[in-house]
Amino acid sequence: MNNIGTIDRLVRVAVGLALLVAGWGGFVEGTPGLVLRIVGFVPLATAAIGFCPLYVPLGLRTRSGSK
């Protein structure tokens, strides 16, 4: 039941890595840095499994092919 396409996955990986680098790289410190470190795993996880739960109620799908 994948609903994330290839380009969407690549964007999610890039965004997730950018958030993690900002949080752990010392670019953002304190509570905002901690938030970035936690939130950075969300796009990486959804890219890894190929499924975005938020897309379901919104009726979105970036993956082509059969449902």
Image: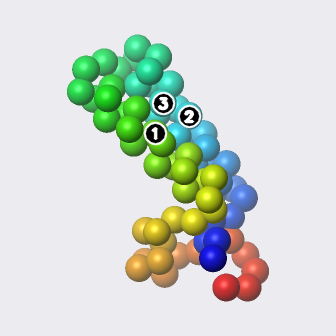
Q: Are marks 3 and 2 in contact (CB under 8 Å)?
A: yes
- Dot 2 surroundings within 10 Å: few (below 14), some, or many (20 or more)? some
Q: Name the residue under label 3.
A: 20
Whether residue 11 appears in this view of the structure is yes
Q: Is mark 2 on a helix, strand or loop?
A: helix
Tell me whether the residue at label 1 lies in contact with that at label 2, contact meaning CB atoms closer than 8 angstroms. yes
Confirm whether residue 62 shows in the render: no
Say what amino acid the circle numbered 2 marks. Leu
| Place of residue 8 in the rendered image (x, y in percent of width and height, measured from the top left) | 63, 57
Amino acid tagged 3: Leu
Q: Of the residues under marks 3 and 1, which one precedes in the sequence? A: 3
Q: Is mark 3 on a helix, strand or loop?
A: helix
- Give me the disc on residue 9: none
Can you say which quadrant of the picture contains the N terminus?
A: bottom right
Mark 1 surroundings within 10 Å by alpha-carbon count, few (fewer than 14), some (14 through 19), many (20 or more): many
- What residue would you read off at disc 2? 17
**Numbered circle sitting on residue 40:** 1
